[in-house]
Image (tube, rainbow, N blue to C red):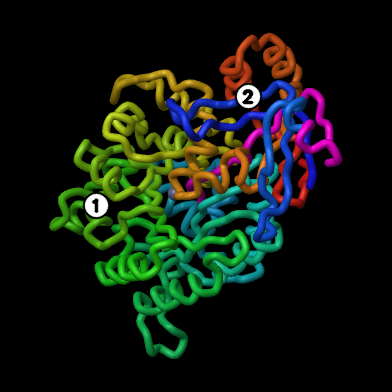
């Protein structure tokens, strides 16, 4: 067993509001293997109380530092790492000019492996310890990412991008090399083979990944829904209701469905463990559909602001009561840093011209990127928190990382002031270490 002494932030799981934080100014976190050999939190609380229970465990002391749960990123595209910060007039020209040419390169296993290595290093440098991310339509891109994540012991969920129409040929799923199966059938065979190869192996999980309804044929969506029913513990990830052009296109292609979101439900792709990026332009009927299905939204504020897509309606989501959490959406998103994402989420919440504006509390913002995001994934009590039993993924933050942070956090009289200073002023410089089970990554 190991023990770490510092200030400690975690979330209450048994009281209202569900995002209420627990904070020890002088805390102790004790980590050790559970019955399965996984490193989990054995005990946590004030240094005085927990030390008395574990007098013999060696303690690593980080004075002036804050231990917090590793961040959970609900949506990104690892093949778009090079696309971050590319100028465009909107979503469709951005896809055509930057994203599609880059994603084509992921047919190469070597290119994919190098990109996966960089992507995962960047997640860890920014304190992200669980990620749900897109690969491309090439199986090589999935295998490369899982292989690197497995080596790093990272909790990562990904899947083969299903896309059999309405995109350049080099991006689409391909027929089998012997020509016996068409691209649609092959994409579904590949998905099932990848589920069997990777899902549940170490800390890896598989996600059935239709890019979005307009780039999949009915047959592909139907096949994806069949797999989702046969593998209920596998995740689903896709996009919905990001902007008005996309919604009009989806409505045109699937006129029989009651809404764009309902299209996914009609193909069996809306259920628990289904994470839909954006969910901006939903009505209350759609929100109830999300809630009743147990699906969750990946809110991507830096991406939505960058591409001018719109503003996630927090009041609407809470009124109807469906799950959501935060996501970087790299490369449409502009940062790997959870601090930048939390600040953008605050800005999005405040916007009051297109929807009710509200001021999200610092604890709520932080929860959305940790325990709340874990709950959206169906991984509450597993990651995103530091309560006993949770996997020991955490970050060590240095609130004095920059002169302004040091000056501002020294003035903080209460927890919300401390957290909001870090949300507004923080970036990767705040993250001194990211600790995953026994592996320690210095940043
Ligand atoms: Zn996306």
Task: Indicate whether 175 appears above or below 277.
Answer: below
Disc 1 is placed on an element classified as helix
Which quarter of the picture shows residue 351?
Answer: top left
Q: Which residue is painted at 46% across and 49% down in the image?
A: 377
165 vs 295: above or below:
below
* Magenta extent: 51-76
> Where 275 falls versus 209 (above or below)?
above
Overall secondary structure of the magenta section:
strand
At horizontal 56% and vertical 17% (from top left) the residue drawn is: 416
* Residue under label 1: 249
Residue drawn at the location 36% of the way across and 37% of the way down: 309
Q: Residue furthest left?
A: 256
Q: Is residue 296 left or right of residue 364?
A: left
- Residue at the spot 78% in from the left edge and 23% down from the top edge: 64
Is any atom of residue 40 visible in this view? yes
Circle 2 residue: 23
Horizontally, is 320 left or right of 31 in the view? left
Sequence-first disc among 1 and 2: 2
Q: Quadrant of residue 153?
A: bottom right
Whole-angstrom CA distance, mark 1 to mark 2, is 47 Å
Q: Residue furthest front?
A: 53
């Amino acid at each position: 067993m190991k023990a770490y002494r510092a200030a400690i932030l975690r979330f209450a799981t048994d009281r209202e509001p569900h995002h209420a934080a627990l904070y020890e100014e002088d805390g102790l976190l004790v980590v050790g293997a559970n019955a399965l050999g996984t490193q989990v939190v054995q005990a946590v609380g004030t240094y005085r109380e927990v030390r008395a229970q574990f007098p013999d465990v060696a303690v690593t002391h980080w004075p002036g530092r804050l231990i917090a749960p590793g961040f959970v990123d609900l949506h990104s595209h690892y093949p778009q790492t090079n696309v971050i910060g590319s100028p465009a007039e909107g979503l469709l020209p951005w896809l055509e000019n930057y994203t599609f040419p880059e994603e084509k390169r992921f047919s190469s296993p070597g290119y994919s492996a190098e990109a996966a290595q960089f992507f995962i290093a960047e997640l860890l440098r920014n304190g992200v310890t669980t990620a749900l991310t897109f690969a491309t339509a090439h199986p090589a891109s999935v295998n490369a990412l899982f292989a690197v994540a497995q080596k790093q012991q990272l909790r990562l969920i990904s899947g083969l991008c299903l896309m059999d129409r309405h995109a350049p040929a080099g991006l689409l799923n391909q027929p089998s090399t012997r020509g016996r199966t068409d691209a649609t059938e092959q994409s579904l065979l590949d998905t099932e083979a990848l589920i069997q190869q990777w899902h549940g192996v170490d800390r890896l999980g598989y996600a059935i990944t239709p890019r979005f309804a307009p780039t999949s044929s009915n047959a592909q969506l139907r096949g994806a829904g069949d797999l989702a029913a046969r593998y209920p513990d596998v995740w689903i990830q896709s996009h919905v209701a990001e902007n008005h052009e996309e919604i009009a296109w989806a409505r045109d292609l699937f006129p029989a469905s009651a809404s764009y979101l309902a299209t996914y439900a009609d193909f069996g792709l809306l259920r628990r463990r289904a994470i839909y990026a954006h969910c901006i332009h939903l009505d209350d009927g759609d929100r109830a559909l999300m809630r009743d299905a147990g699906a969750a939204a990946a809110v991507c504020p830096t991406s939505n602001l960058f591409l001018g897509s719109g503003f996630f309606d927090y009041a609407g989501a809470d009124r109807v009561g469906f799950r959501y959490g935060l996501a970087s959406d790299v490369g449409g998103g502009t940062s790997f840093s959870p601090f930048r994402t939390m600040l953008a989420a605050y800005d999005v919440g405040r916007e009051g011209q297109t929807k009710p504006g509200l001021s999200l509390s610092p604890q709520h913002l932080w929860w959305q990127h940790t325990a709340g995001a874990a709950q959206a994934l169906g991984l509450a009590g597993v990651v995103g928190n530091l309560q006993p039993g949770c996997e020991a993924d955490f970050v060590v933050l240095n609130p004095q990382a920059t002169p302004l942070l040091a000056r501002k956090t020294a003035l903080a009289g209460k927890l919300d002031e401390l957290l909001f200073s870090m949300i507004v002023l923080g970036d990767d410089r705040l993250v001194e270490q990211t600790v995953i089970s026994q592996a320690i990554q210095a940043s």
